[in-house]
Image (cartoon, grey):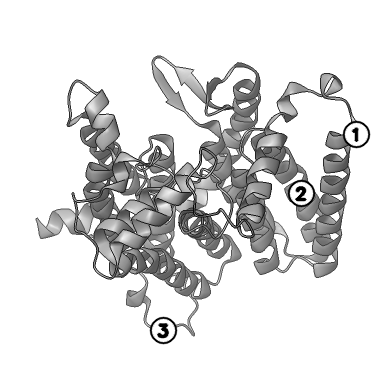
């Protein structure tokens, strides 16, 4: 058994531990949070079995991907990025609609979100392009390409999922800062985007509705959520449950019921009221059942993942694996923080799932690939002895692969 784990579960043991802890928490909390799905199904165990199957497939993906040398992943990423652009266009015009948004593509009875693959491929490509900018001229060329492809991908995602596009752009922007792209260029990029947003918002209020493209209808959903969030803070009736604040209020009730140690798994009441208890608002169920202690533990897992990724990236003497690890980890952690922040009403409703923990198919599988790539870096970077000679003991990063 020990030889089996040494052979098939190499790489950094801390990253593996975080992944499996998130999976275990996910199974326990999904069992409680999916009660509404279980009652609608002919088989009450079906939602849990489905979720467990995706987690098992995710674990298999982590194990499989981490055996592939991270150096070859950039070549595949360029191909996936091109396919993702076509898939996003298809989703906008012919995609499966749910919650007033066309984010899914149906193939043979299965549905997947092309935006998840677009996020993954874009982050890998951006890491590769920044790493290739070894001179000022090369970095300037890479910057132009990065801006172009990022605006295309984020623009397509933005039409149906503003929060995902915003997070993705933020991660790419942070990667460019870490990659030492001049602040002047970054400032001009931000200024141009802000100007575009202002002009776009103004045009949506000036142009008559009958002359607007229907693809921009999601704008009013964003505006409504933001204005509702800002207005509720000052509303004297903010504690009255209405159709508009139903989900937010029941999420807050779940958190309030949790107390310090929670009501323990299986005893949640708010799972019966929260319409997205198993997805967007699963963190509320986590806090209700595991209490403040459990909620902080889940948050600590994501933050520790970021801390560990920072250690790994710092000890790499090659910019590509460093940026790859940081970019993928930032995507996981920022999405988790946004999801938890929405649950505790620190921001408007976004629909962001809690990585690995929330119910989902495409999200779980693609996030598992993130973990696999990170583990691939910790495995093969050591195997090739490509670690900074001034860094601490290499064994703190990864385990020696079996001979």
* Residue 260, percent from left and from top: 28, 71
| Residue 354 seen from this side | no
> Where, quadrant-wise, is the N terminus in this rendering?
bottom left
Q: How crowded is mark 3: few (under 14 residues within 10 Å), some or many (20 or more)?
A: few
Mark toward the viewer: 3 or 2: 2
Q: Who's the residue at 30% across and 44% down the image?
A: 271
Q: Name the residue under label 1.
A: 206
Q: Which residue is drawn at 41% across and 63% down?
A: 302
Using the image as rendered, state which of residue 356 and residue 274 is in the foreground.
274
Q: What residue is shown at x 90% (from left), y 34% (from top)? A: 206
Badge 2: few (under 14), some or many (20 or more) residues near its Cα, within 10 Å?
Answer: some
Question: Dot 1 lies on which element?
Answer: helix
The residue closer to the viewer here, 215 or 131, is: 215
Residue topped by disc 3: 392
Q: In this view, does 270 lie to the left or right of 384?
A: left
How far, Cα to Cα, is label 2 from label 1?
A: 29 Å
Q: How many dots with numbers?
A: 3
Image quadrant occupied by the C terminus: bottom left
Q: How far apart are marks 1 and 3 (CA)?
A: 60 Å
């Amino acid at each position: 058994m020990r030889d089996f784990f040494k052979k098939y579960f190499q790489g950094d043991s801390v990253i593996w531990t975080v992944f499996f802890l998130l999976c275990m928490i996910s199974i326990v909390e999904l069992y409680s949070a999916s009660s509404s799905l279980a009652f609608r199904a002919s088989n009450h165990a079906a939602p849990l079995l489905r979720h467990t199957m995706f987690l098992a497939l995710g674990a298999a993906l982590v194990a499989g991907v981490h055996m592939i040398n991270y150096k070859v992943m950039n070549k595949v990423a360029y191909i996936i990025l091109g396919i993702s652009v076509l898939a996003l266009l298809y989703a906008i015009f012919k995609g499966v609609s749910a919650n007033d948004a066309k984010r899914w593509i149906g193939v043979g009875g299965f549905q997947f979100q092309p935006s998840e693959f677009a996020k993954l491929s874009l982050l890998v490509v951006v890491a590769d392009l920044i790493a290739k900018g070894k001179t000022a001229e090369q970095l300037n060329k890479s910057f132009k390409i990065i801006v172009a492809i990022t605006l295309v991908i984020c623009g397509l995602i933005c039409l149906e999922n503003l929060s995902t596009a915003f997070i993705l752009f933020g991660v790419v922007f942070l990667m460019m800062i870490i990659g030492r792209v001049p602040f002047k260029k970054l400032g001009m990029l931000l200024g141009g985007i802000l100007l575009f947003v202002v002009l776009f918002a103004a045009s949506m209020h000036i142009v008559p509705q009958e002359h607007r493209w229907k693809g921009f209808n999601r704008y009013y959903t964003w505006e409504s959520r933001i204005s509702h969030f800002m207005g509720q803070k000052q509303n004297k009736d903010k504690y009255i449950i209405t159709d508009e604040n139903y989900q937010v209020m029941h999420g807050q009730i779940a958190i309030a019921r949790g107390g310090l140690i929670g009501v323990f798994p299986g005893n949640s009441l708010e799972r019966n009221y929260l319409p997205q208890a198993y997805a967007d608002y699963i963190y509320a169920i986590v806090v209700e059942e595991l209490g403040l202690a459990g909620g902080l533990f889940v948050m600590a897992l994501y933050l520790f993942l970021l801390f560990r990724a920072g250690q790994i990236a710092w000890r790499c003497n090659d910019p590509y694996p460093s940026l790859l690890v940081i970019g993928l980890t930032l995507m996981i952690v920022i999405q988790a923080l946004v999801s938890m922040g929405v649950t505790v009403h620190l921001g408007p409703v976004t629909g962001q799932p809690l990585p690995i923990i929330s119910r989902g198919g495409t999200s779980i599988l693609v996030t598992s690939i993130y973990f696999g790539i990170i583990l691939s870096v910790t495995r093969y970077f050591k195997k090739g002895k490509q670690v900074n000679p001034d860094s601490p003991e290499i064994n703190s990063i990864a385990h020696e692969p079996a001979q």
